[in-house]
Image (cartoon, rainbow, N blue to C red):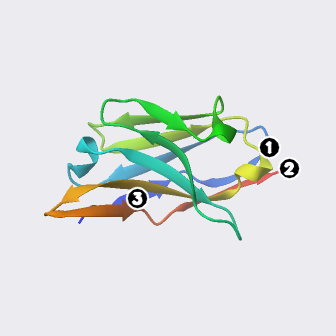
Amino acid sequence: QVQLVESGGGLVQAGGFLRLSCLASGSFFRFNDVGWYRQAPGKQRELVATISTDGSTNYEDSVKGRFTISKDNGKKTVYLEMNSLKSEDTAVYYCNTHGWYSGYYRTFWGQGTQVTVSS
């Protein structure tokens, strides 16, 4: 089983900065894409950013230019640096990875970390 543990969330003022971390168990992580999702109260979970095994990245439009996703394979950790935070960034942020695992295509989620941006 692949375990993902997020950390780094908290309360920050609008315009502030946070860096989220996603620590993964095992080696599955370094051979599959990893993404950060978020879910605000009353809303569906949405994709925020992804990083592929070759290091290429993609971002949801509202976070482009403000958020940066990166990966440290040696530390089995994916980061999400969030700058110029806005109140609408308030959500629980989840780490995700997916791929073939023990003969099945699996999706793995972390438990989430709360980000609250005060205006």
Mark 3, other Cα within 10 Å: few <14 / some 14–19 / many ≥20: some
x and y percentages locating residue 99 in the rendered image: 27, 54
C-alpha gap between disc 3 and disc 2: 28 Å
Quick check: 87 above or below 74?
below
Q: Secondary structure at mark 3?
A: strand
Give me the disc on residue 119. 2
x and y percentages locating residue 35 in the rendered image: 44, 48
| Quadrant of res 68 | top right
Nearer to us in this view, 58 or 86: 58
Is disc 3 in contact with disc 1, using a CB cutoff of under 8 Å? no
Q: Amino acid at mark 1?
A: Ala
**Residue under the image location 70 percent in, 50 percent down:** 89
Please report whichever mark, 3 or 1, sits nearer to the chain's N-terminal start: 3
Q: Most extreme residue toward the right, as rendered?
A: 119
Q: Amino acid at mark 3?
A: Val
Is disc 1 in contact with disc 2, using a CB cutoff of under 8 Å? yes
**Residue under the image location 22 percent in, 51 percent down:** 28
Quick check: 39 above or below 50?
below
Is disc 3 in contact with disc 2, using a CB cutoff of under 8 Å? no
Q: Secondary structure at mark 1?
A: loop
Give me the disc on residue 5. 3
Q: Secondary structure at mark 2?
A: loop
**Residue under the image location 30 percent in, 40 percent down:** 75
C-alpha gap between disc 3 and disc 1: 25 Å
**Is 64 positioned to the left or the right of 27 in the image?**
right
The residue carrying mark 1 is: 14
